[in-house]
Image: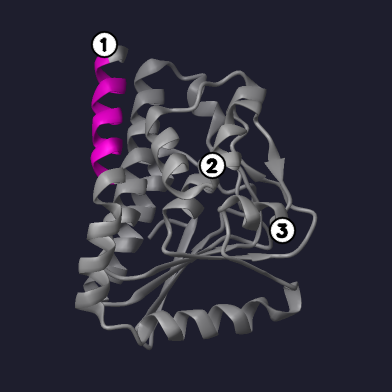
Amino acid sequence: MASGIRVKIAGGIARIVLDDGKANALSAERLYELDEALGAAEKAGAVAVLSGREGIFSAGFDLKTFQRGQGATLEMLSAGAAAIVRLLSFPLPVLAVCTGHAYPMGAFLLLAADARIGVAGPWRIGLNEVAIGLTLPRFAVEIARHRLSPPAFARVPTAVMLDPDEAQRAGYLDRVVPSGGLAAAVDEEAARLRALDMPSFAATKQRINERVLAAIGEAVRGELLSAR
């Protein structure tokens, strides 16, 4: 595994840590590494716990890639959509641990996880594409529609960024804990998820996510056609 992602699997739990020593920007290459990490977790039959480094979950898509032209941009966006589909269809529970700021694509990963814990602090979480001159990808619109509250979804065009408590109310997070209690909260939730009946979990998750997966597939096809 490349240096931007660490994976440790033990006791039925795969701890996948995004840590490039900087902002955890998600290039196509980094998203491919995430897919490899999830593949290792699935092979081990392990609950996946996805976290960032202290103060930053992810700064989102690698903005430098947008400057490399349409081909590189489409590859990165396609890898982002594939990562969302991977998480939504992953047959084992995925726990996302928001360790700080979460900008797109980091916020998309939170929205695609089965359970989300955030750490309290002066962090900003949300979809700010419009503020930096970007249009929200259609696949991202679908995952936002699937997980955010209706009022929060309606505010997406305004590029609002939220603190952790606001993000919990909006639907990005399920729970916010103090920094000193994060490790214990993650261990407790991972153990709870590990104790689920996995065939029942996978079948129920498939039923719950089948509509959003179909919508994302249609969105990706439409985006690729319009880019030709």
Check disc 1 and give the amino acid type.
Answer: Arg
Q: Is residue 125 above or below residue 220?
A: below
For mark 3, does the 10 Å Cα neighbourhood hold few (<14), some (14 to 19), or many (20 or more) residues?
some
Residue at horizontal 75 percent and vertical 79 percent from the top: 180
Residue 194 location (% of width, % of height)? 37, 83
Residue at horizontal 39 percent and vertical 46 percent from the top: 31
Q: CA distance from mark 1 to mark 3?
A: 41 Å
Is 218 inside the magenta-drawn segment?
A: yes
Q: CA distance from mark 3 to mark 2?
A: 17 Å
Check disc 2 and give the amino acid type.
Answer: Pro
For the residues carrying marks 1 and 2, which lies nearer the camera in this image? 2
Residue closer to the observer: 172 or 16 = 172
Residue at horizontal 33 percent and vertical 33 percent from the top: 78
Residue indicated by mark 1:
228
Residue indicated by mark 2:
150
Residue 115 location (% of width, % of height)? 47, 66
